[in-house]
Amino acid sequence: MILNTRPNIADSDGFYADLLAAHRGLPEAESHAMNARLVLILANHIGDAKVLSQALVLARAES
Amino acid sequence: MAFAHQPFDYVAPAGLRAPEPRHKVIIVGAGPIGLAMAIELANHGVLATVLDDNNVVSVGSRAICWSKRSLEILDRLGVGERSVTKGVTWKVGRTFHRDKEVFNFDLLPEDGHKMPAFVNLQQYFVEEYLVQRAQALNIDLRWKNRVISVDQKADFASVKVVTPDGSYMLEADWVLACDGARSPIREMMGLEFDGELFEERFLIADIEMQGDFASERWFWFEPNFHPGQSALLHKQPDNIYRIDLQLGWDTDPEVEKRPETVSPRIEKVVGHADFKLDWISVYTFQCRRLRSFVHSNILFVGDSAHVVSPFGARGGNGGLGDVDALGWRLAAVINGVAAPEALQGYDRERCYGADENLLNSSRSTRFMSPEPGIERLFRDAVLHLAGRADFARPMVNSGRLSKPCIYPLVAPDADLPAGARPGAVAPDAPLENGWMTEALGRDFVLLALGCDAPELGLRVVKPVLTDMIRRRYLGDQPQAVYLIRPDQVVAARWLSVSAAGVAAALEQSWEG
Ligand SMILES: Cc1cc2nc3c(=O)[nH]c(=O)nc-3n(C[C@H](O)[C@H](O)[C@H](O)COP(=O)(O)OP(=O)(O)OC[C@H]3O[C@@H](n4cnc5c(N)ncnc54)[C@H](O)[C@@H]3O)c2cc1C
């Protein structure tokens, strides 16, 4: 499996708004903790080690 | 070349000498929405009286982007072709992060439409064309007539009007508040205007320069020439360019408006000093709406009913959507064809439309101006990824440009193309003579495709079935009948239908 970097969320504006809404009102440290949990949850959903390592590389790269 | 504002003539109104007979409709405000409303009503046989506290068109260009749907509406009002001819036609938007393009869109990737995706045309031109059209239709436009109070009775409303020659009273069956974002009528009635204010300031400037920038919308996040903020460049007719610069909340609007502050900022955007400042303003944007646009015999239309931040061009275009939804209904009520309850349809549909505009505009504004902390972190992450991963590009939000909303109608439907479903504006297409939008006209019509329409006394449009019409209206089906409203919204559609079926759908369309 290779990491899908094509747009894959039908309503990306809606998702983005939901993401921000989930964080609204949290102090920054709790937001970071929530993000960490979110990464772990989604990583588990993906499962595939190759995909996960490609995602790590993409996220880590400097612009 | 800068626009020369010609004042319109003030004429002392009859009401100063003796009480005027009760009017059918008074429109308060001769902005684009009040003027469009007056012409739309005149096209349906109702002559309104328009009051405006001023005697010139919009000072400063304000709205510049007019959507395809607005152009179709303006065309029905008689000023569409003029607007397109004068305007700068565009459909591509490019978004940059620093100096790298991270997202672009093409708003009208297909041909076969009379009107382009967008034209840029200064608001003062649109208003000028509308004024001339209204004058040609003998609409009573009263300049320098300021409404200072309103009194609502059970079956009429009266307003007190101040003119340079003193004040007078006017009565009307219907008062349309088209008096803009600060709506004095909304204030006088003490109506709540709910929503949010963004703690952000934007410098909006129109400059005149010779240049050959593309006819595209260019938007930058954190450009090198304006670090940490956003910027927008848009071309208008007569060598005028619109520049929006995000300033941050901590800036002083009075200082920012000074030419000596503005000029160096603009020099950095365009790369030279060879330009003239035409109009400068500093804005804070809000997203708000009235809970209801219909208050018995006083109706709110345009900015008085809803305001949005301008990224997405949903203010004026949204207001023209109101005009579209209200005109035929109100005219029918006045002409005794429909009950006043029909206006509830206006309220419901345009609150729905306003919510869609508010949602999109506030999301764009948030993306441009994220709150410090996690919002900022995600925004920057999207911009960072957009340069390297396709999926992040559609998340970059510099404005989602105005589209007509699709009303959630409960109506007969069939297995036909989604783009022409009930609630959507009937798609345009070329006909043998002219265009679908022109053929549909201003009344309920039946569109008969590949078959005959049942006989009900409704006008029938029966075009030759070209490939484009098949694609937009039939899909794989051999035939269909569409019932189309006076605002060109599809009311119902069938593969085949009886006269009774059409009559029932027609009846349903009039209900609130
Ligand atoms: C910087 C900026 C950029 C924008 N860009 C776009 C864009 O690209 N596309 C778009 O669609 N929209 C845009 N808009 C929004 C657009 O300008 C408004 O939505 C539009 O002007 C609304 O029209 P209106 O007729 O409802 O109100 P207005 O244009 O505000 O007209 C209201 C009228 O009522 C009159 N009036 C007020 N009070 C009284 C009274 N008491 N008595 C009599 N008359 C009165 C006023 O003089 C005025 O003529 C932009 C707005 C801004 C500020």
Image: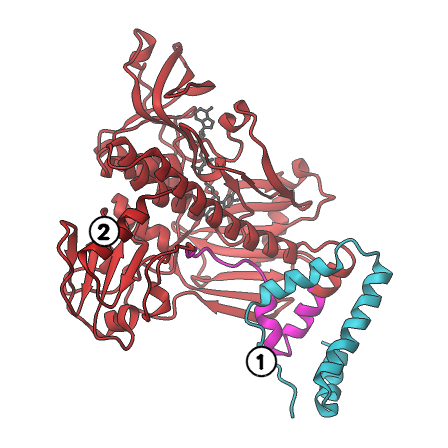
- Amino acid type of the residue tagged 2 in the rendering: Ala
Could you confirm whether marks 1 and 2 are on the same chain?
no
Q: Is residue B213 above or below residue B189?
A: below
Is residue B492 visible to the viewer in this orientation of the structure? Answer: yes
* Front residue (pair B335, B118): B335
* Rendered image: mark on residue B503: 2
Camera-near label (1 vs 2) is 2
Q: Which chain is cyan?
A: A
| Residue bearing the label numbered 1 | A6
| Colouring chosen for the image of the structure | by chain
Q: Nearer the viewer, residue B127 or B185?
A: B185
- Identify which residue is drawn at 76% across, 76% down: A41
Q: Image quadrant of residue B425? A: bottom left
The chain holding disc 2 is B
Read off the magenta span: B379-406
Quarter of the view holding residue B460? bottom left
Q: Which chain is red?
A: B
| Residue B355 falls within the magenta-colored stretch | no
Front residue (pair B473, B218): B473
In the rendered image, the quadrant that contains the N terminus of chain B is: top left
Q: CA distance from mark 1 to mark 2?
A: 48 Å
Q: Secondary structure at mark 2?
A: helix
Identify the residue at horizontal 29%, vertical 41% (top origin). B328
Dot 1: element: loop
Image x and y of residue B163, in percent: 40, 15
Question: Which quadrant: the C terminus of chain B?
Answer: top left
| Badge 1 amino acid | Arg
Subunit that carries the residue with mark 1: A
**Vertical position of residue B27 compared to residue B478: above or below:** above
View extreme (right): residue: A29
